[in-house]
Amino acid sequence: MKQDILINTNSAETRVAILEDGRVEEVYVERQSNLGLVGNIYLGKVVRVLPGMQSAFIEIGLERTAFLHVADMVVAAHSPSASQVSTGNTLPPIETILFDGQTVLVQVIKDPIGTKGARLSTKISIAGRLLVHLPKEQGIGVTQKVEDDEERWALKNRLIDLLGTNKNNAQGGYIIRTAACDSPIDEWQNDINYLNCAWKNIQQLAQKHPAPYLIHKDLSLAQRVLRDMVTTDTASVVTDDAQTLAELQEFAEQYTPSVTGKLMLAPIERPLFDAYKVEEEINLALQLRVDLKSGGYLVIEATEAMTTIDVNTGSYVSGRNFADTILKTNLEAAREIVHQLRLRNLGGMIILDFIDMSNPTHAESVMDTLRKEFARDRTRTAVYPFSPLGLIEVTRKRTRESLAQLLCEPCPMCSGRGVIKTTRTICYEILREIRREACQFNATAFRVVAHPDVVDMLLDEVAPHLAAVSSQIAKPISLQTQNMFFQEQYDIILM
Ligand SMILES: [Zn+2]
């Protein structure tokens, strides 16, 4: 399998497409508007120590000075009186640890909001893919998502062994993330190497630059792609932005040297995502229906509880090739289902409803195709055999937001229900509303303002009922179209 990675960047967002044998299989999007400052590491300068609040204002180069509380400080390493506070949880007074004008290495733990500056910590943490490095602390933690005690110990011991084998490995604390559980040992080592390298850089930069200075940012999507997704199968990493290319080259030289030769700039004649049909695939991945070459189609519905995928034959099939036609459609559907699940990044419980097959060998080959296709999926999946009702259940680990969650919002027309009330339903609703208001208010006349389709029906098929209401309440009712309204929207004016 040949893999190519496309990176499309502009000032607003970065989009990454992973192509396998020329076809888009995964899409990642990172928007500037969603990125905060949390995780950024700065060399800050103490502006003012506030003993009364046990806090200090720190200048980190933002509009407002940031805030550091003594509880968010690593005390032992800094405090001249550390030996006196080694017992108990009592913190030393902040005025004994910090002084005005002092430079400190700090990390943002809370974004600035309104008039409040960012909240800082001196407990630095650097996130890798599998591990988090806490250079100023000690001990190894395991994510609470690993519930089995024995597994936690096994993971801890594995890391202790790894750290022990190489004197160059940075000491300090580590946290083992969920992604680490399934990963082979060489990936752990890669992550440790990356974290060591990052921490060394941070320390060097802190010595080179005067405060305030931004020293470290969490990796951008494009950088994470280089670190996490480039494999020996990767033929090229193509970007359409010269500045991004330069940044990636610098990053690759430092952290992932094997990638440097694969980085290239896309020709400018055509937008990168158009040239490789990525835009087209993204738009398809937001549709309910996906057409198959064999004439059938899929209907993919993602709800909060689960995703259901229904396989349909397109046109009427009959004759002696009936079973073969169905098998052909189901096999194509199986491949397309895995493709769509990856592209849409749908996770959780997934129910597949293939076209019924009476031949057990045919059913088995659909199962085989599913398993084979899922084997290429980076995300962990499990496929369960046909249920008594002929359904296949799949679980796919939820990782990040699905493509639709990233790019879409509930439809304001139908409030996400996927259907809207019929014109007739709206007409009847309006009639009930007029009766109600006639009882409640003493108006001389009523005017209905509604979508043109609704007004049309009130003038035509529903006209007798409208007349009946009018005579019942003994008030005239006039109609007015409003093109800006959507179908369900209307207003009743009391004259
Ligand atoms: Zn809608």
Image (tube, grey):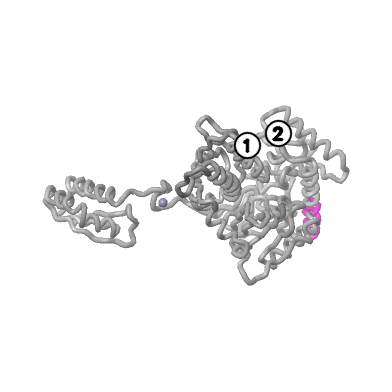
Ligand 1 lies under 8 Å from the Cβ of mark 1? no
* Mark 2 Cα shell of 10 Å, populated few (<14), some (14-19), many (≥20): few
Residue at the spot of label 1? 382
Q: Amino acid at mark 1?
A: Ala
200 falls in the magenta region: yes
In the drawing, does residue 21 fall left or right of residue 253?
Answer: left
Asked whether residue 220 is in view, the answer is no
Q: Which mark is residue 288?
A: none
- Where is residue 328 drawn, in percent x and y? 57, 46
268 falls in the magenta region: no
In the drawing, does residue 188 fall left or right of residue 315?
Answer: right
Residue at the spot of label 2? 89
- Where is residue 339 drawn, in percent x and y? 60, 49
* Mark 1 Cα shell of 10 Å, populated few (<14), some (14-19), many (≥20): few
Is 419 or 155 nearer to us in this picture?
419
Q: Residue at x 21, y 45 (%)?
A: 436
Q: Quadrant of residue 450?
A: bottom left
Considering only vertical position in the picture, is 160 above or below 343? above
In the drawing, does residue 467 fall left or right of residue 222?
Answer: left
Q: Quadrant of residue 205?
A: bottom right
Q: CA distance from mark 1 to mark 2?
A: 46 Å
Considering only vertical position in the picture, is 123 above or below 481? above
Q: Amino acid at mark 2?
A: Asn
| Secondary structure mostly seen in the magenta stretch | helix
In the drawing, does residue 116 fall left or right of residue 262?
Answer: left
Tell me the element at label 1.
Answer: strand
Looking at the rendering, the stretch of residues picked out in magenta corresponds to: 199-208
